[in-house]
Image (cartoon, grey):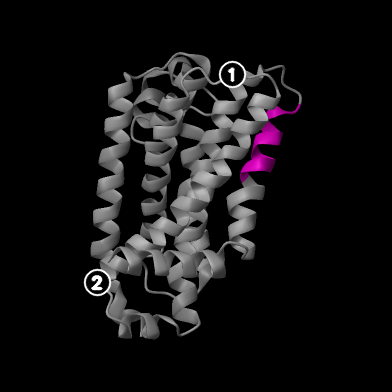
């Protein structure tokens, strides 16, 4: 099964990494959003870099996985995949792996930028584990966006943007959780991105709002939940794609 998963992931990497929506929503959009927040504000780099890392891994990990199924449906290549001896679960995990690789690789860029600006990573092991877990979690979330059995990529991108954009503003990236009112903390606690942002702030700035075990546990639970729902929903939607 491992070789089949890797074959699917490699196919996705070759076909989809440089597609327009992936580049725009996965790389350029978080960059411009960060610059809009940064310009004109006298904020230390140590505060900005964790937020940039969080935005980057969230957008990159959820930029590849939502578009794979619609494009496969549109190009009529899904039938060829299903005719091979692979299960829907293998397809899903392969798509998640491709998105996971994209997210983890690109997330290294803002970390390197931070180091170049003199920001030190106090807990590199915590940051590395958090990036790996978050990349998997957000990649699985991206597969949920592509569950509707449509061949129109624009519909899926509209749905994912509708969800992702509010999540960015409630997850402690621009306003730390400890500076939010009570209702803001309650809303932020519902977002998986909040827990990765908290871990990134701890790894770089040395403090966290939640206990570290709670951050890791939340990401793990969300990752398992998203993976379970993605597999179940795609198993139901697959017959409608033909």
Name the residue nearer the viewer: 191 or 106. Answer: 106
Name the residue nearer the viewer: 241 or 7. Answer: 7
In screen coordinates, is 217 left or right of 200?
left
- Give the residue pinned by disc 1: 120
For the point 66% across and 16% down, which residue is it?
44
Q: Where residue 237 sits in the image (x, y, percent)?
A: 30, 73
Residue 37 located within the stretch drawn in magenta: yes
Query: Does residue 152 show up?
Result: yes
In this rendering, the label closer to the viewer, 1 or 2: 1
Element carrying mark 1: loop
Q: Where residue 240 sits in the image (x, y, percent)?
A: 32, 80
- Give the residue pinned by disc 2: 236
Distance of label 1 from label 2 (alpha carbons): 47 Å
Q: Is residue 129 above or below residue 238?
A: above
Q: Which residues are magenta?
A: 30-39
Sequence-first disc among 1 and 2: 1
Name the residue nearer the viewer: 89 or 121. Answer: 121
Element carrying mark 2: helix
What is the number of the mark on residue 216? none
Q: Where residue 177 sits in the image (x, y, percent)?
A: 44, 21
């Amino acid at each position: 099964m491992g070789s089949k998963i890797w074959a699917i992931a490699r196919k996705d990497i070759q076909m989809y990494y440089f597609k327009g929506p992936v580049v725009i929503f996965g790389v350029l959009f978080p960059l411009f959003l960060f610059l809009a927040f940064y310009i004109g504000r006298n904020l230390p780099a140590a505060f900005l870099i964790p937020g940039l890392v969080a935005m980057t891994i969230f957008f990159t990990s959820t930029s590849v996985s939502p578009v794979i199924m619609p494009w496969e449906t549109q190009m009529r290549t899904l039938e060829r995949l299903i005719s091979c001896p692979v299960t829907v679960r293998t397809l899903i995990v392969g798509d998640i792996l491709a998105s996971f690789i994209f997210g983890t690789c690109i997330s290294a860029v803002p970390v390197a930028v931070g180091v170049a600006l003199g920001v030190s990573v106090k807990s590199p092991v915590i940051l590395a584990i958090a990036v790996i877990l978050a990349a998997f979690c957000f990649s699985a979330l991206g597969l949920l966006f592509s569950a509707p059995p449509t061949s129109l990529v624009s519909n899926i991108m509209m749905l994912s943007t509708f969800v992702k954009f509010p999540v960015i503003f409630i997850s402690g990236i621009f306003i730390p959780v400890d500076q939010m009112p009570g209702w803001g903390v309650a809303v932020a606690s519902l977002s998986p991105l909040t827990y990765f942002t908290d871990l990134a702030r701890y790894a770089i700035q040395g403090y966290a709002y939640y206990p570290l075990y709670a951050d890791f546990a939340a990401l793990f639970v969300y990752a398992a939940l998203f993976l379970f729902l993605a597999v179940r929903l795609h198993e139901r939607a697959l017959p409608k794609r033909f």
